[in-house]
Image (cartoon, rainbow, N blue to C red):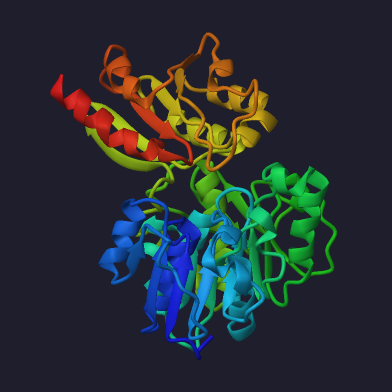
Amino acid sequence: MNKYKEVYILGIGGSGMSSIAKYLVQQNIDVAGYDQRKSFITNQLNQDGIKVDFNLSNLKYSKKILYIYSSAISINETTLKDYLDSDNVLSRPEFLNILSKENKIIGITGTHGKTSTTALLAHIFHYNERNVSYIFGGITSFHGIGGHYGDQDQPIILETDEAFNTFKDINIDDLLVTNIDVDHLDYFKNFKNLLNAFKHVIENVKGNLVLNFDDQNLRELKTSNNCISYSSSEIADIQIQYPNKIIIENEEYVVTTKLIGNHFISNIAGAIALAYLNGIKIEDSIEAVETFPGVKRRTEYLGSIKGIKLYDDYGHHPTEIAATISALKENTIGKLYVIFQPHRYTRTKNGFEDFRASLSKADETIVVDIYPAGEEPIPGVSSKNFENKKIKYLKSMRMVPSYLSTRVTENDIILTLGAGDITLLGPQILKYLDEI
């Protein structure tokens, strides 16, 4: 890796690729890249000194440049299609594989919670003056885009993503697994294949392994690794007592956090365990947790107007949605209104009934049209199918602010939910409510 002074990243505006860009630019490498459109992330990259192109017509291959491309880019439609076998043209998984051969890797994986847990663990290390490197697909208020190049004698804390089996060949020293749930079946075809992919990664961990035993799939996993477990039951090494206590070696600790929901307390317990296995005292981790502001789009508080609070969340899987809605319901004096944008036609089709059940936990849910994320429409798969007594379909997000304005009152909460461009809606709702 060290022989390249220039790196060009295709799909640089994606959450995973932008964090790699920031990690590399902090090594005094000249980093640039391409993305399809301007966004909050590309603006952040510009502020970090990274040039972003929005047209590939001028892209030319050079042996002196390292190229890293995202799965979201149709690489065979670019100039690089003739150089895919070259050592300096790498997919994101290939880059991370090479990176893991040259550094100690502390990995965090799981269907849900891996981004916020990776960010939290990185925060714990930095709070305790351990200048680790980290790469995760999110944005925080304390360091912006989730990439950082730390001290060379420190590990890399890495979000190890299961999508497209990205984590398959990464050399992982220590690993925390938050859960395994049904997702990415468009790639894995069935849940058994997904389970086997996780099992492969878990069995190849070289050092410490931390597993969430509240997850049945992890509890039943037969592995030769020694592991530390955490759970809300008594079967685990670390016991969680909701809403805010953990018990380790018969010592009880109270966790104070800005994060809302039992799922976050569970992730905190796992992060504290992994930090402890890497030399950070439990008390010091708990102190760090109290100062952690969270990751953007993970039950992110956007503001309030006229006594109405508004949150935004990245949740795009039924289990995530149910957890976030339940957490906010417990903290809502009035009603909880959810605006959901389904992500991908395949995911909507495969999880339709589970999505509808999760969304029905809110007092009222509005569903807008599906965000395709590059997929072609599937006949018969539509957001309109979600409609029932508690779920209303509105075709356009532009219709949402005026619709909500006739319904919400003081002490209500509004939650925008989804992995697409629905994140732009929250500020528009706040502005609309302020002006009426």
Is residue 301 shown above or below 175?
above
**Residue 84's x, y, as percent?**
63, 71
In front of the other: 402 or 321: 402
Q: Kindly identify the residue that appears in the image at 59 percent across and 35 percent down.
A: 376
Q: Kindly identify the residue that appears in the image at 76 percent across and 45 percent down.
A: 216
**Residue 149's x, y, as percent?**
42, 78
Specify the quadrant of the image occupied by residue 85: bottom right
**Residue 373's x, y, as percent?**
53, 42
Is residue 397 shown above or below 244?
above
From the image, which quarter does the C terminus lie in? top left
In front of the other: 359 or 375: 375
Q: Is residue 373 visible?
A: yes
Is residue 64 shown above or below 24?
below
**Residue 217's x, y, as percent?**
77, 48
Specify the quadrant of the image occupied by residue 424: top left
101 displayed left or right of 67: right
Q: Kindly identify the residue that appears in the image at 46 percent across and 54 percent down.
A: 254
191 displayed left or right of 333: right
Farthest residue to the left: give it.
Answer: 435
Count every numbered label the image shows and give the total. 0
From the image, which quarter does the N terminus lie in? bottom right
420 displayed left or right of 71: left
In front of the other: 365 or 169: 169
In front of the other: 203 or 392: 392
Q: Is residue 20 visible?
A: no
